[in-house]
Image (spheres, rainbow, N blue to C red):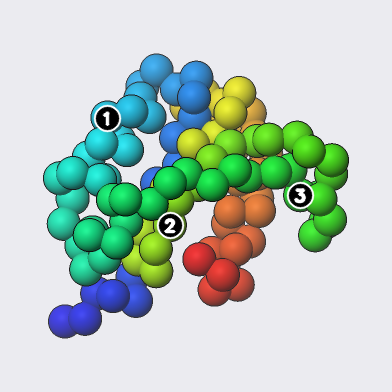
Amino acid sequence: KDNYSVKQIFVTGDDDFICYRKPIRSWLENTLVFTESAKFKPLNLTVLYLIYLGYSVGDKVVGYRKAVTQVAYYELLNSGHFMYNDQVSVVRAILSDLSSGKL
């Protein structure tokens, strides 16, 4: 079966002490094997800026991201384990991108 079309999204918060971001990122880069593993590992994190209704809202950094076709990894700033409460607009944007096929 071709699982290349299956999207996997991993979202961590920098204040999440249940699923700590460093081991999750290390696991994705060094242990998890997927079609684009070699392409994913050397990628640098890109900065995520706050977007509201499709428009950038200043230069407020809300997190970091690295992604390939199959896997997307997000580190959200000022967010704990309940990121959907801590960073509502960012999580909403991630889910919107997923449902529209942008991820």
Q: Against 99, is 45 above or below?
A: above
Q: Against 70, is 23 above or below?
A: above
Dot 1, how many residues are within 10 Å of its Cα: few (below 14), some (14-19), or many (20+)?
A: few
Q: Distance between the residues labelled 2 and 1?
A: 17 Å
Q: Is mark 1 on a helix, strand or loop?
A: helix
Q: Is mark 2 on a helix, strand or loop?
A: strand
Residue depicted at 38% across the width and 52% down the height: 43
Residue that carries the numbered disc 1 in the rendered image: 23
Q: Position of residue 6 (x, y in %)?
A: 33, 70
Q: In which quarter of the image is residue 62?
A: top right
Badge 3 or badge 2: first in the primary sequence: 3
Q: How far apart are marks 3 and 2 (CA)?
A: 18 Å
Q: Is residue 29 left or right of residue 19?
A: left
Q: Say the numbered circle drawn on residue 74.
A: none
Residue that carries the numbered disc 3 in the rendered image: 51
- Of residues 48 and 98, the one drawn nearer to the viewer in this rendering: 48
